[in-house]
Amino acid sequence: MRGSRLVLALIVLLAAVALWYTGRPSRTTVGTSGTAPVVSKANIKTSQPPAGTVSEAPSVQEAVPATVSNVAPDAPAAPPPKTRSGVLLTAPPPEDVEALERDLTHVQLMFREYRDMLGENPVGNNAEIMRAILGDNLKQAKIGAPENQTMNAEGELCDRWGTPYFFHQVSRDRMEVRSAGPDRKMWTADDRQMN
């Protein structure tokens, strides 16, 4: 009688361990090098694969792609993709850079035309400079904003992303023009400037 109780207790213990073990989530670690995670035998589930799939389990140390089902819940999440509407771009796409360079060139040509007519750069912030460009100057010379560029409600000339340019009068005949770029924030890596 005592031997059968011992066997029964051992079976119950083994069943509990088996239930605990199979109910655990798979623990796969993702390497810091950005490579696919490594699978060990402890991580491989022995359940039947869905119909139409290969039933061969990966071998020890075989790399498999990281998916939601085989990455440990405490593993760090991958950063979200960088897009135009939301997360900042690390660098503007080449076509944006080329278009922005053309825009900055047109703004510099506007300042050159102003200097040719009045002998020096306009002074002030963006809105004050644009008022001078549009005719509020000593000679009442009306230059006008560059073609295909917009001004906001405050009278500031804006880049293609709707952010006002930053103008810095370096000297009588030199003007620095800076665009905030696609992230719409000044003094970040994607800014572009022209002197």
Image: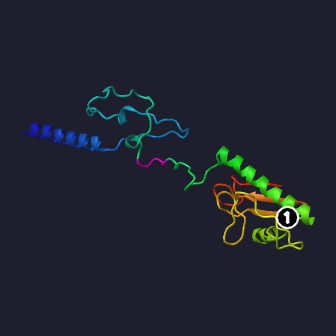
Whether residue 34 sits left or right of residue 186 in the image: it is: left
* Residue 69 is inside the magenta segment: no
Specify the quadrant of the image occupied by residue 146: bottom right
- Which corner quadrant holds the C terminus? bottom right
Q: In the rendered view, would you say 8 is above or below 129?
A: above
Q: Residue furthest left?
A: 1
Q: Secondary structure at mark 1?
A: strand
What is the magenta range?
Answer: 73-77
Whether residue 130 sits left or right of residue 140 in the image: it is: left
Could you tell me if residue 143 is visible in this image? yes
Specify the quadrant of the image occupied by residue 152: bottom right
Q: Amino acid at mark 1?
A: Gln
Specify the quadrant of the image occupied by residue 86: bottom right
Picture coordinates of residue 47, whole percent (x, y): 26, 34
* Residue 74 is inside the magenta segment: yes
In-front residue for pair 133/181: 133
Q: How is the image coloured?
A: rainbow
Residue of label 1: 169
Picture coordinates of residue 1, whole percent (x, y): 6, 39
Whether residue 124 sits left or right of residue 97 in the image: it is: right
Could you tell me if residue 171 is visible in this image? no
In-front residue for pair 100/139: 139
Picture coordinates of residue 119, whole percent (x, y): 93, 64
Picture coordinates of residue 141, whole percent (x, y): 86, 68
